């Protein structure tokens, strides 16, 4: 349930983008104007949030620490109105502006700008914030629908959406993939080695010894090889969601060999083979950032032990 705005407790937000202004008059001037605005309306200034030397053009709220803290405090109900001297002190990026105002509206917190005389502290102002949130959600949803439709249309014509896998390249934007000769041969060899009993780690070590690197320029690991051996682009297919279409690009792996490798993966029993000694913390530790499980692995050129997330998981530490 949203809280009713009492119109009494005010949080001020001040900001300067030029570090040379941090110790100057600008921050004090902003706060003075906000203080006079509060006094004229009989409101109590209970908190001041300041980002010094930070641009308002950034599209990431977390890059402005006190701005992010203000929004957290709004969610916690610590004040009723957020006030700035001018709107550009709050945000110059339209996405950040909309996102932050919607968040205030959802928390039942009003918003006001002294200079522009923007006042969302009234019931009508709250309705503006609520309407803004509904409109943003609608257009975001519509954008997602159109994007998915465009992606499916491309996939149905055999054009893959997304970056090229190892062994393939896109000659130009919007074009079908083409094989990269040496890499494509290495992909075929990786499938053959797996079919003949090599572990993911052993294949990664072989790729590393041949001087190959992933598309991100990193050495192959067992997890990267496992992901690679499941990529259906190699048999000339293109996926979009749960649907699959014949691609315009040529297959670089024989379909029968590909299917055999997938059957090995599905029917494999016993512990996962690690290229080297299995770590004693296997399955017992996780990433401090996202909580994903960490698995023991090896840095294959020197054989050094390490723990890492699966190659396909999205986490800032898994780059």
Image: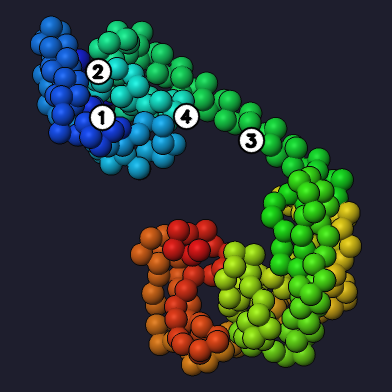
| Alpha carbon separation for disc pair 3 and 2 | 35 Å
Residue 318: % across, % down: 49, 65
Q: Are marks 1 and 3 in contact (CB under 8 Å)?
A: no
Q: Earlier in the sequence, mark 1 or mark 4?
A: 1
Q: Earlier in the sequence, mark 1 or mark 3?
A: 1
Instruction: Look at mark 4 in the image and give the residue it sits on.
Output: 95
Instruction: Look at mark 2 in the image and give the residue it sits on.
Output: 85
- Picture quadrant of residue 218: bottom right
The label shown at residue 144 is 3
Check the image and report above or below for 25 versus 168.
above
Kind of element beneath mark 2: loop
Kind of element beneath mark 3: helix
| Alpha carbon separation for disc pair 1 and 4 | 18 Å
The label shown at residue 282 is none
Kind of element beneath mark 4: helix
| Alpha carbon separation for disc pair 1 and 3 | 34 Å
What residue sits 44% from the left and 81% below the top?
A: 306
| Alpha carbon separation for disc pair 2 and 1 | 9 Å
Q: Earlier in the sequence, mark 2 or mark 1?
A: 1
| Alpha carbon separation for disc pair 4 and 2 | 20 Å
Instruction: Look at mark 1 in the image and give the residue it sits on.
Output: 15
What residue sits 66% from the left and 80% below the top?
A: 211
What residue sits 36% from the left and 31% below the top?
A: 56
């Amino acid at each position: 349930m949203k809280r009713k705005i009492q119109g009494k407790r005010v949080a001020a937000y001040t900001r300067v983008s030029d570090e040379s202004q941090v110790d100057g008059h600008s921050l004090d001037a902003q706060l003075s104007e906000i203080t006079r605005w509060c006094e004229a309306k009989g409101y109590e200034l209970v908190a001041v949030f300041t980002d010094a030397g930070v641009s308002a053009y950034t599209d990431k709220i977390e890059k402005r620490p006190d701005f992010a803290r203000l929004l957290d405090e709004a969610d916690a109900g610590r004040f009723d109105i957020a006030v700035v001297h001018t709107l550009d002190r709050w945000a110059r990026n339209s996405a950040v502006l909309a996102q932050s105002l919607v968040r205030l509206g959802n928390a039942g917190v009003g918003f006001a700008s002294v200079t522009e005389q923007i006042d969302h502290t009234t019931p009508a102002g709250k309705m503006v914030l609520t309407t803004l949130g509904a409109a943003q959600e609608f257009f975001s949803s519509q954008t997602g629908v159109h994007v998915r439709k465009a992606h499916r249309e491309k996939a149905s014509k055999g054009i893959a959406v997304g970056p090229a896998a190892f062994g393939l390249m896109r000659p130009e934007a919007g074009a079908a993939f083409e094989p990269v000769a040496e890499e494509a041969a290495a992909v075929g060899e990786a499938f053959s080695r797996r079919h003949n009993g090599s572990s993911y780690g052993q294949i990664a070590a072989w790729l590393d010894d041949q001087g190959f690197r992933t598309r991100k320029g990193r050495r192959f690991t067992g997890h990267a090889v496992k992901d690679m051996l499941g990529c259906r682009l190699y048999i000339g297919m293109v996926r979009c969601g749960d649907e699959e279409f014949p691609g315009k690009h040529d297959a670089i792996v024989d379909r029968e060999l590909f299917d055999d490798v997938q059957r090995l993966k599905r029917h494999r029993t016993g512990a996962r083979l690690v290229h080297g000694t299995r770590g004693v913390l296997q399955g017992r530790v996780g990433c401090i950032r996202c909580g994903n499980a960490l698995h023991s692995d090896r840095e294959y050129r020197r054989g050094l032990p390490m723990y890492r997330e699966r190659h396909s998981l999205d986490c800032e530490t898994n780059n």
